[in-house]
Image (cartoon, rainbow, N blue to C red):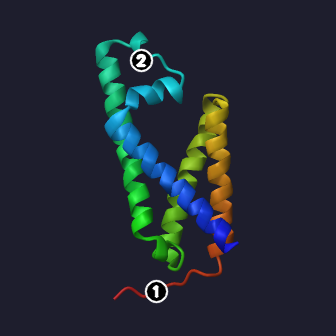
Amino acid sequence: MRRLSYFFFYSYVGLVCLAGAWGAFFHARLDFALLMEVDMEVLNDKAQVNLLSQYRFLRAIELGFGLFALSFVKEIFSQKKFNALFLLIMGAGIVARLASCLYEGWPNIMMLFFMCYELLGLVIIYLYTRNKVKDYAVA
């Protein structure tokens, strides 16, 4: 279970960092075409700028979460506070995807794959760490 937990952790966090950096600083427009099947040219210039600005911001936050997770791997797998925060953030993303399914409808197969992969990773990491993490007194 340890190897599987770390596999899902590093593959998830690695993808979060890669996707975050890619979308924030490189090819946000390409993400809209490939991942979301959106033709940006149908939007007026101001709408494109606003959408891309917000998208880049959210991808930068995603990158920040990934870097946080990489910086505190040991703590995430050993301390209750870090573990709970990591799983809460990961779970919030999954719940947001599920809410979108309810409100907007079913996304494409790639988005469904990400959601299922994230959910499986969350469950495996939780099951592996639930009896291993400890409360540490903060001095």
Image position of 79 with respect to 45: above or below: below
- Give me the disc on residue 136: 1
Please state which amino acid type lies under the numbered disc 2: Met
Residue 48: image quadrant is: top left
Q: How far across and how far down the image is residue 3, in percent?
A: 65, 70
Label 2: which secondary element: helix
Q: Nearer the viewer, residue 119 or 103?
A: 119
Of the residues tagged 1 and 2, which is closer to the observer?
Answer: 2
Where, quadrant-wise, is the N terminus in this rendering? bottom right
Residue 49: image quadrant is: top left
**Residue at figure coordinates x 44%, y 63% from the top left:** 69
Label 1: which secondary element: loop
**Residue at figure coordinates x 65%, y 50% from the top left:** 117
**Residue at figure coordinates x 41%, y 56% from the top left:** 65
Q: How far across and how far down the image is residue 124, in percent?
A: 68, 64
Q: Is residue 126 left or right of residue 79?
A: right
Residue receiving disc 2: 40
**Residue at figure coordinates x 29%, y 18% from the top left:** 46
